[in-house]
Each structure stands twice: as C-alpha cells, then as structure tokens.
Image: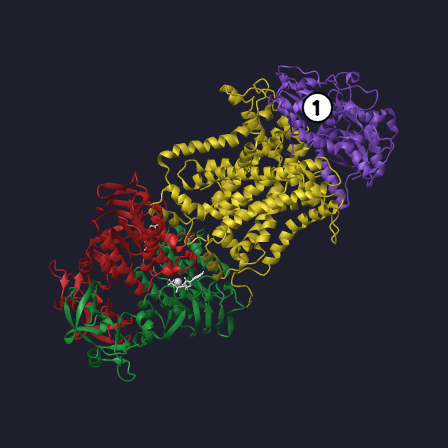
Chain colours: A yellow, B purple, C red, D green
Amino acid sequence: MRQTRNRGNGQPRWLFPFVITVIFCLSVLPLGRLAATGIMSAFHGGASELLSDPGLWRSVYDTLSTSFFGMIAAVVLGGGFALLLTLFDIRGKALLGFLFMLPTMIPPQVTALSWIGMTGPSSALLKAIGLAPPLGSPQPLYSIGGIALLYGVQNAALVYLSLRAGLLALPRDAVEAARLSGASSFQVLKDVILPLSLPGFAAGAAIAFVSCVGNFGIPAILGIPAGIYTLPTLIYSKFAAFGPRTFADISVLSALIAILSVVGLMVEARVLRGRDYRVIGLSGQVAVFRLGAWRWLAELLLWLTIFLILAMPLIALVASSLAPAYGVPLSPATVTIKAYEEILVRQAATRIAFTNSLSLSLATAFGLLVVTVLTGYFLVRSKSRFVGLISALAEIPYALPGIVLAVAFILLFAAPIPVIGISIYGTIWIILIAYFSSFFAVSLKPVVSAFRQLDPSLEEAARLSGAGFTRRLADILVPLVAPAAGASVILVFLIACNELTVSALLWSAGTQTLGVLIYNLDDSGSFNIAAALSVLVVIMVIAMMVVLELMAKRLPKGVVPWRS
Amino acid sequence: ADLVLYTSQPNEDAQATVDGFKAANPGLDVQWVRDGTPQIMAKLNAEIQAGNPAADVLLIADTVTLERMKQAGQLMAYKSPEAANYDKTLYDADGFYHSTKLITTGIIYNTQAAMKPTSWADLAKPEAKGLVTMPSPLASGAALIHAQTLAGVSGLGWDYYKNLKANGAIAAGGNGAILKSVASGEKAYGFVVDYLPIREKAKGAPVEFVFPKEGVSAVTEPAAILSSTKHADNAKKFIDYVLSQKGQEGFLKLGYIPARNGMAVPPGFPARETIKVLPINAPEALKNSEKDVKGFADIFGIKG
Amino acid sequence: MAKLILNRLSKTFDLGGRAAVNDVSLTVREGGFLALLGPSGCGKTTVLRMIAGFEQPSDGSILLGERVLADAGEMVPPEHRNMAMVFQSYGLWPHMSVAENVGYPLKVRGISGEKRDRKVREALAAVHLETYADRRPADLSGGQRQRVALARCLVTEPDVVLLDEPLANLDRHLRQEMEETFREFHARSGATMIYVTHDQAEAMALATDVAVMSEGRLLQVATPEEIYARPEGRLVGGLVGQGAILSLPPPFGDRRLFDWPAMQEILAGLAQEPRADILVRPQDVEIAAEGQVATVLSVLFEGERYALRLALPDGQALRAFSRQPVKVGDGLSIVIRAAWRL
Amino acid sequence: MAKLILNRLSKTFDLGGRAAVNDVSLTVREGGFLALLGPSGCGKTTVLRMIAGFEQPSDGSILLGERVLADAGEMVPPEHRNMAMVFQSYGLWPHMSVAENVGYPLKVRGISGEKRDRKVREALAAVHLETYADRRPADLSGGQRQRVALARCLVTEPDVVLLDEPLANLDRHLRQEMEETFREFHARSGATMIYVTHDQAEAMALATDVAVMSEGRLLQVATPEEIYARPEGRLVGGLVGQGAILSLPPPFGDRRLFDWPAMQEILAGLAQEPRADILVRPQDVEIAAEGQVATVLSVLFEGERYALRLALPDGQALRAFSRQPVKVGDGLSIVIRAAWRL
Ligand SMILES: Nc1ncnc2c1ncn2[C@@H]1O[C@H](COP(=O)(O)OP(=O)(O)OP(=O)(O)O)[C@@H](O)[C@H]1O
Ligand SMILES: Nc1ncnc2c1ncn2[C@@H]1O[C@H](COP(=O)(O)OP(=O)(O)OP(=O)(O)O)[C@@H](O)[C@H]1O
Ligand SMILES: [Mg+2]
Ligand SMILES: [Mg+2]
C-alpha cells in the first residue's frame, strides 16, 4: 500500500515534474533562446536607443489601447452571445451558436478588407441606399476604434466559448434563489450569474486581450494608414529592414509584449483572487429566463450580428473568388469558377496544404488538450508557489506575434538537437511544437476556469470509489469539464487551421500550411485563387463541424459548443 | 537537396525559375522557400544566428539588403561570366550580387478616377486630394528604395513626400494592398510595382499603370550566394542560369523586364528605351536607409 | 396577503413519462401553515417549484387571492411573486459571504446601510451563525449551510414562504429552536407558509394543516389532529405517524374506530374473508395480561423506550413500545386499546 | 478488516481559527457500527473526511489495524483505502446516469458485464430506484439523489463505510427500510461503519456504539443504552434523547440516579445553593395526583401524544408528554419518576 506525502490533494507525484517539463519545453526554452540572442546582439548596439524612442512608447500605448478596447468589444460580442444563447429562450440557439464560431475561421485581413469595402466609397451596400461616401473620404475603420472593433469580431468566439462553459456549470438553484429574492433578470445576471461564471468570463477576456496584444493582421491593414503602430507591426517592420541590431530590438519589443500580457493576466488574477467559485450542489441544469416581448428584438440583434461578422465577409470572399480580377464588378457575365478549377485541379500544393493543416490542427487541438487538462488541474489544485509563474509562462507565447515565436523556434532548432543529433528543422514537427507553444494558452484558459468551478466532492467521491488519478481524470474530471474541453479543442482547431505567421517561417517544401498557401497566393497577386481557397477552407470547417454535430449524441454533454 | 533557394518572388514565378534551372541542369534536386522579404530575412538571420543557415542562394527584392549582407561578410563573391552582358550598375563590382530583372515602381490609377496622372507631381495636385496610397517602406523593400530614389530627384525630393502627406496621401501595407485598394476604388491613385497592375489589367481589373515622365525607380531582384553555402558549385550554376539568355527569357515570359542587355519587354509595357529608370547607389542607400526610414516615418506620422 | 389556491395542478416532465404532480387542488387559507408530507419522489418539491414560479404547470393554475400566478400558458416570474424559499439543496451563492447571502434579498429591495446590517445580524443570530458572517458557504458544515438558507429565507417579509425540508440536516435541539423560530415568524408576519418535510412530528407540531401526497396525487388535507386520528386510506395511514396496518375481517357497519372489545371480536374471526385495512398505532398497543398473544420479531432501542415489532399468530406484524427491554422470540400478551379502519 | 483507531486527531482549517476537530481519540472495533452525534458544525463531517483521506490531520493519526492511514505528515490516498462514503452533499456525478453512478466503483474495480449489471440492479432495488436507472441525477428529487448516493456506497465491499447523514432527506418509512438495509449490509459484510446523524433515535437503533461530539471535542463514547441512561455532562445530556436539564441543589453523596422520593427532597430545597445539573426525561415525568405543581408553558401536538413544556414554581422548564390535550396555563401535578445527575 502506497503512502504519499501529498496533503490529500490527490495529485500524483509525476504531475509537478510533468507540468514543469511542459512549461520548460513550450515556453521557457524558446523564450530564453530568443532572449539570449537578443542580449548577445544588444552588445553590438544599444537597446537603450530603442527604449528612448518616443515612437516606441507611442506604440506601447496604441497596443494597450487597441487591445483593451478590442477586449471590451470581444467581451460585449462574445459575452452577449454566450449569455443570450445559454440563459434565454432564444430560438435557433444551435444554429446561432454554430455560426458564431465561424468568424474565427475567416482570416482577419479578409474581414478587415470586407469591412473597409462595406464602409468605404465603393460599398455596394451604401451605394444602394445612396449613402456611399465620396471617393477619398477618410475611412472610419482606420482608427483605434476600427482596430478594436475588428479585434472584437476576431476574438469574440474566445470569450463566447469560455463563458459558455462557465455558465453551463452554474447550479440551477443558485439562480432561482436569486430570482425568488426578488432580483430582476438584470440583477440576477449582475449579482449571481456573472460573478459565478467570472472564471470563465475573466479567462475569455484575458485570452482575448492577450490575443489582441499579439495580433498582426488587423493593425497591419487598419493601423498603418492611420499611423497607428502596435508592437507586432513594429516588430514586423524591424524584420523588414534587417540590421545588426534587429534581434536586440525584437527581444526588447517581445519583452514589452510579454509584460503587457502578464499585466493582463495579473488583472485577471486580481479579479479572481480570494474568491471561491466551487459550485455547491448539483449543476447539470441551466435555469432559462424568458425574454417575453424582448425575444424578437434579441433574435434580430443576434442575426444582424451574424450577418455583419460572418455573412458579409463571407460574401465578399465568395465574390472575389468568383471574380476574374480584383475590382471587376461581379455580374453574370463576369462570374468565373476558374479559381476553383485552379486550386482543385491544378495545384498539387493545395492537397498537401489541406493535409498538413488538418493534421497539424487536429494534432495540436487534441494533443494540447491532454497537456492542458493535466496542467489546468495542477494549476487549480496545487498550492505551489509557482502557480502564478507557470500560468504567466504558459500565456506569453500566445501573446507574441507568430513571427517572433517562429524565430525563437528557428534559433532553437535550426541546428540539430544536441545529444540526439536529429534535426527537426524543415520538418512538420517543428511547426507542431511551435503550435503547441503558441496555442497552449488558448487551450489552457477554458480548462482552468472549468476546474475552478468544479465541486470538489465529485472528485472525492470518485477517489473513494477507488479511482486513481488517471482513472478519475478520464471518467470524472474530463467529462465534468467537457464543455470547456470542447471549447478548447474547437478554438485551437479553428485558430490553427488558418494560422499563418508561425508556419510562414517554419514551413519548407512539403510542409506548407493553408495559411501560408493563402498568404502566398494573395501576396503574389492571385487574389481570386486565394479567396477561393479561403472559401474552401471555410466549407471544410463547416463540413467538419457538421460531422461533429452528427456525432454529438455520443459525446459528453456540452462538448459541442453550439448544442444546448 | 543539392541546392536551397530563398526567394521573395511570387509563388508561381519562383516555381517557374526553379523549373527552368532544373531543365538546364538535369538531375539537381532544388528546394526553394518563398516568402515576403521581412519573413525571408527573419528566417535567414535566425538560421545564421543559430549557426546553420539552410539557404545556398538568395533571390530577393533589392540590392540594399544584399549590400548589407555583403558588408556583414555573409555573402560569397562569384564573378559570373554572364555579367558581361549587363550594365555595370546592375551588379556588384566584386561579384557579390547580380541583378536579374527590373521591377519598376510607377503609378496605378483606377479607370474611374477623374484625373489621369502622367507624372509624380500630378499626385500632389488638389484633384488627388485624399486619393493617394503608397506602400510603406516598413512593409515593402521596394518602397524604401523608391523613396530614396525620388528623394534624389531634383524637383521632387523629400518635399514631394511632404506635399503628398499634406494632400492626404497614406502609406500602408505592401504592393498587393495598394493594388486592391485602387482596384476596389477605395483610393484612386497609388504607387505600385509595375507587373501587378499590368497583369490584373489584362485580366480585366479596372486599373491602369503609368510610367511617370520624371522616371521610375527600380529594384532589380538580385541573386547572391551565401558564404556558408555547402553547394557552392550548384549555387554558381544557378547564378549563371538566371543571368543567362534562357533564364532571362523565363523572367520575360513571367511578365518582368529582364535586366540583360538587348532583351524585349513583356506585353503591356512600353518599349524599354522609353522607360526612364532613375539611378540609385546601393552602398549610399544602405548607409542612409535607417535615416531615410525614419524620415519617411516622420513625414507620414508612422510610429508616432 | 390572500388565499393560495392550487387548482387542478399538474406537471409532467419531458423525461419520465408519469406526471410528477397530478391534478392537485388545494387551498391554503390566508396566513395558513401547510405541511406537505409524502414519500421521497412524490412531487413535493415540484409543487413548491411551481408555486415559486420555476416550473410552468402542464395543466391547472395557481392563484394568490384573485391574482393568477401561473397556468399552462402564462406565468408571473418568480421575482414578482414576493415569496421566499429554502431550497432542498440550499441554493447558496458560493461567491458571497454568509452575510451577503442573507442580505441579498434586502439589497434587491433597496434596503441598505444600517437597516440592512441590522436585519442581517438579527437573521443570523436567529440561526446561531453570528460569528460566521464573513465565511463563504463552501467553508461551512452542512447544517450551517442549511441555516444560512433559512436566515436568507426569513430576512424579508414575503407573502408566501416555501420551505423544502429546511431542517433535514439539523440536530434535534436546533430543530426545536428553528421550529420555534418558524412559529414566531409565522405569527409575526402572517405569511402563508408551506412546509415540506418527511418528519411527521415536525409537521404536526408546526402546521395548521397537513397535506399528504403520494405519486403526484393529493391524498388528504386536514388539521394535524384530524389526519393523525382519522387518516383516509392505506397510504395516508402508513405515512402519518407510526403504526402497523393489519388486514383483518371487516367489522360490522360503518364504524371506524374500535376499542379493545371490538378488536377482540375482530381478532377472533381472523380466518374470515374479505378483509379490511386496520391501522394500529404502537402507543395503542399495551403489554398487559389477558390479551392477545404475540411474538416479538425485533427490538430496537430508541432511547426513551424500545420499539418492538410483534407478530400476531397469523404472522401479521404489529408495532408496539416497551419501556422495558424484551427479547426477540418472547411471547407477549397485548391489548389493543384503539384501532382505526382506513 | 481491523480496528479503526483515531489517535489524538486534530484538524484546524486555515480559516476560522478554532480547531474544527480537537484531540479526538476513539477506537471503533472491528465490524463495529459507530454513530457520531453532535450539534451542527461540531466537526463530524471533518472527522469522516479525515478518515476517508480528504483532509490531512493537523495532528494525531488514524490507523486501520496496524496500518497508519494518515498522520500529520503521511497519508494513504483515499483511492487506496477501500472505503465508501455517502456525502452530505451526495457528490453524484451529473454527467453519468443513475446506473452509471452506482456502477462506477465496480467499474473501477474491474468488475464488468453481467456481474456488474446484476450488482447495480440489486443496489438500486434496495433503494427502490430500479425504474430510475437511466435518469441523470439532475432529474431526480432530493430524496432520490440521496438514495442513489446510498446505493453507490453499498454496491462494493468496502472495509469501512462512512455515512454522513445518509437519511436526512427521506421520509420515515424509507428511513426505516434503509436502516434495515444498513443493518443487513453491516451483518453481511462485517464492514466497520461510521454513521453521522442528528437523529438520536436512528443512532440508537442502528449503532453498537454512540460517540457524542461538541465543538470539535469528543465528549463520550458508549453503547446506546449506556449513553442514554448515563450521559456524562450537560452537553451529552442535552444532546442524547430529549429531556430538560434542571439546575437543582446538589443531592447528597455521589448518587446520580434519583427516584421520586429523592427528587421530592431535592425539589423541596429549591432555594439552596450551590446547584447541580439534573436531567429529567419527559417520559419520566408523569402527570399524577399528589405531585409537584407545574404550569403548562406550551403544548405541541406530535401525533402519538402531546409534548408539553412545563414550568416549575421557580420558573425552570421541564418537558413531559401527555396523551390528552391540555391547555397552556393549566396547573398540573407531576411526579418525576427518574432523574439523572449529569
Ligand atoms: N473548508 C473549511 N474552512 C474553514 N472552516 C471549515 C471548513 N469546513 C468546515 N469548517 C468548519 O469546521 C467546523 C466543523 O465542520 P463540519 O463540517 O465537520 O461540521 P459537522 O459536524 O459535519 O456539522 P453539520 O452537522 O452541520 O454538517 C464548522 O464550524 C465549520 O464551519
Ligand atoms: N427535471 C426533472 N425531469 C424529470 N423528472 C423529474 C425532474 N425533477 C423531478 N423529477 C421527478 O419528479 C418526481 C417528483 O420529484 P420531486 O422533486 O417533486 O419529489 P419530492 O417529493 O420533492 O421528493 P424528495 O422528498 O425525495 O425530495 C420524482 O419522481 C422525480 O424523479
Ligand atoms: Mg424534494
Ligand atoms: Mg456535516
């Protein structure tokens, strides 16, 4: 009979070393390697010059403000959807939830361009109602607000999924008790539902913030015309004019990004501190509010949002995939499916890219889930002093622009790995590891917040049944955090599926990903082919989600995020 | 692989170049990686830092970057016999890099635009107020060279850029973004590299390309061998190939102006003699690049 | 305040087929105190949840005075009913401290500052939890949680108070005190109270009326004395109070209450058919000379006395008390002082 | 199986300062059935949780036979203790059906197929939930959930069974049946059982030993008869069984049990100081002529009888039963048949 030194918290002995190793490999090692190079090259020229540049601080400020407002937008959008769809008697919940996932899939630049198109002088929509601004009038999206808005659209699903998982864990009687106390729906929301689902809420907001801090695509399109430089666009420009000091500069800028994201996390930790979110009693049923006369309005609002964030960019995408050239007005005479023929029939690269991206994102999503369930469990249950540090380290890689992370991995793996002597550089494995590192935070967040809400007696009952750690992990814990686990898998999958900036530097012959392919096509002027490919990717994802929907009955309750 | 090529050429072009080279040198296994200039440089430099660069040859946008690498000792000198057929300004005297084609930057305009510009100066006129867009040197290598080139032209200079800014011009993104912006009618005029609008126009896009009368700037997409190459012989063969008549005809077919003397121009371009290419001094440009980027940034309110 | 009327109330869940509540009609008079008894799963909680407005009736309606609270179509939301409830599973808010939990109904009603603090303090004092005001529910024992739920329920002035096994986790002393608290609260506020419990003694002690349910149906409503003395049917007889139900030959006429002479006659004709159900309460079974012979089946120590199960000669079981220990297998002579035909 | 020994067990939570369990030493003999009584919040659940292995003792140790289960440093994890427990909050898994919940301990032990199905069916039958096998816990009533927890606890063959108020939400009939089930299970499996309850009758009926706790401390351990007849100290006297504690002049010598003549003497000297605590159980208070005069303070109907609170001339309260209703304010004459000095 084994005795353990643990204080009844039931963690197996290997858990701590495991978590440490994971964090070391996925975060400490690449970040450390980057920092080492940065410090080395800082000797060649002072980084102090960079730091004393007022322009830098201006970008820090812009990064902060765009990310902050972006987070707010994401919280409003994603939070609104999550609340309305889980707690109210909205019709067509499943479909709305399903559609709400999809904007994550549409490359941000496509969304940005379609919004620009929609609000600009050539907007068919505005032209139709005679409100199109004259040629050359300033574009309202080229602003902090515009960037924040698109950040919000892009990251709303993060908040949605994370919060939804939290809402599903609410015990019904807590909500009912509040209503009977006389609290109006709004008060119940404010005083009971939101505070109780705060872990999910805060996790969603934090990850959205971190994601905004690291975003490149949107500020590149919307920020630069307005002279707004965020740290990622700044980093990009440093790479463009590569000089002897570049590595030092990059390291400094990355460190700034890391600090910003850690600040975001500290705010999250601060919000959650000293609170107890363990659900008392049996969850498993959600109280549903009636909207009554407001239902129509709410439904209209939801569908309108879906139209704006999904239908419109998608229509733009489809339109440009069918147009012979950019800017040619689409009419029955000009429509052509040449682009689709080109990718489906002629380009061998398409098939390879589909295979690569699919296997990479599936492997990352499910592989990471294993890692994050263990890490999340450790973070919530352990009283270790390292918990804060570990969560911060897990988060930073996601905040760094993909290009920086990719550089870190090149620095790490360009030479064969010491001792084993194998080189993974140029293979698909380096992309996989980089994905693990980059999306660790995305996968971890919802799982951690779900663990926070878990009623401990459920695990205890399993322990007393004789279930060892792995056993109860599989039978009890994972099914109980299933909504969060499902959210985590789907999020990582969606994001990895059209990921660009990490794989852009790490791919080589035979390992190109969809993101890279679309980018290269677009960059070399084959706009319509790129658009066609994007459309196909969206179709593929929808198809996969439909398959998931068909399997939903056999999966634990709540895993499929659009099912109630 | 027998040879690894890093290039910023568009996908299809890179593939065509490699295919041509393989046809000329059967049996060689050539790997290539293509990406935008910032990414390629980031990748390459990270590899160099890690002490194991994978590339043997580079074929990238501008001489300025290669000049910097030459000065850092990262390039290998090779005096290609084909250089004799080229203008002296188009290759490094020591043989560290050789230009392969001319990619000029001119003016694109939407066919619905009221004014048809013919000169750079036109874009500073009131008719173009708020309608001009150009690539940012932070996103496009050609854009900086273009700015440095125009800065050296009397009557234009940095004042020209200041006038443009005052006229509501913006600097954003790369050439692709400019093309989209103008083709979609969001802006009416833009600075852009020649081949994009010419190709798109052929496909029916509502755009027109102009070689302004003051002259155009050009980047020359030079090729170079890395000093760390493990396949020096193959690398030299590659340089020879891209400079050869055959290689140059390949570029021509892809729609570029070949750098080699006595070649034709692609369809849609005016005769070679009528294109006035403004000169640029690579070492000089390199020396000033940081200052110029800053100057440009200051004018356009970039980075603050 | 006004009468609370349940009118042919029914509820069927999607799952489970059988109606959880089936055609229940019931009037609780203004300021009444109704105890709802019934075996586990008979629909007590469901009735309370419909009264509170958490479940929509599948059929029938609920009225408070003239006002229709709910029927199969419409429903006044719980927050507009001015009711309070102790949930069987407490329904505490884990993110609020004990004091915040208790003070929340006041906060919602816009009562704040000194007044709220005072009321919260009073409510906590009533359940002996003054010193726990700043704890979180998760750090309390089961009974303490239940007491917080109680305090929260009684802190406002609701029209209707719904109590779902509010004392299930408390020891006897605390129960007695809490019963006292309920009684006082009821007297003071005049609220209509509905009290679900499985403890008849509690129900009898507190309620002005007792309703007995089984399998979703209402079996009988009456005053505690009435329902104890004159239960209708096997189910109520078995549920209210202790006792054994004997199957004996039907006695003459429609007499229902039998004394010992009558019982002797009945017992004499044991072999006869048909039979009727006759309830015999243990306190009515006296161990005395010259009675019926019975064998001791089991003996349970209850503190105050021993609870016996006895077998009549034909094997039917009877319950009785004894102040003295007896042994299993002993033969006793018993007298049945009273019995009631169900 | 072997003796379960708690050796000077203490537990202090980070919050709350005062030790939740304080220096508790206790031996439960092999196959014993220990009932743990005590007021709400006295540390009963905490003791169970330490035995199960969910909390580490702050001090002291727990042994099962020779084997140290836990002390302040080491601890055998719960999954290796072969114990079973009914949680006060049930701890049912919402994602599993009732049958899966009950079958899980078997599944973990590698029992599958027909055998598992049979055992699960048996366990569900024992708690009358056969027809609910496919429901989710969320769709059950409170008592049904508790019964699922019970079935899950009894489905395996644990060495030690910990029951934390396992019948709190069940009606009397079901309770009696479940008590029967426990008794059978105990007899059949020989498991050591520890039973937390607030219901003394239940404790007395089931247990071979009763332990009384208060404020974290163990006050007395004895057989049910012993603890009922001879409680040690005010606290135990107040907790076990009903009764009133009178503060009366100390009687002569160290006699502790008094009959009516002795009580008469004591009552006669009412004004004297100092005083001692004397426990009078209600069933020992007889309404009879020629006794002490007392006034009726309150009358509660209990079904079987009326529970009275009486006041002695000096105002001290006494409890008594009456089969006949009496009125508040009436004067009665009473005889105290037995009393016990605490
Ligand atoms: N996690 C905790 N943190 C701080 N104090 C706690 C915690 N859990 C319990 N306590 C306190 O320890 C004491 C004993 O609690 P325990 O749950 O053992 O009581 P109990 O005897 O089971 O009571 P009940 O009959 O009400 O369930 C209580 O005062 C309780 O408030
Ligand atoms: N959400 C639900 N879905 C389906 N059936 C339900 C649901 N809730 C309760 N039931 C069933 O309805 C019946 C009545 O349940 P209810 O909770 O009202 O019982 P109860 O009388 O309160 O029992 P207890 O004393 O055990 O708490 C039970 O058989 C229960 O299984
Ligand atoms: Mg109930
Ligand atoms: Mg307890």
Task: Indicate left or right for A264 with C311 as reference.
Answer: right
Q: Front-most of C231 and B213? A: B213
Where in the image, quadrant-wise, is ligand 1 located?
Answer: bottom left
SS class of the residue under badge 1? helix
Q: Is residue C320 above or below residue B32?
A: below
Q: What residue is drawn where x is 28% and y is 56%?
A: C38
Residue C79, x across and y down, in percent:
33, 44
User: What subunit carries mark 1?
Assistant: B
Q: Front-most of A338 and D281? A: D281
Task: Indicate left or right for D238 with A385 as reference.
Answer: left
Residue A29, x across and y down, in percent:
67, 50
Q: Front-most of A418 and A266? A: A266
Residue C156, x across and y down, in percent:
30, 50
Q: Is residue C171 above or below residue A487?
A: below
What residue is shown with label 1?
Answer: B159
At label 1, counting other C-alpha atoms closer than 10 Å, the crowd grade (few under 14, some 14-19, many 20 or more) is few
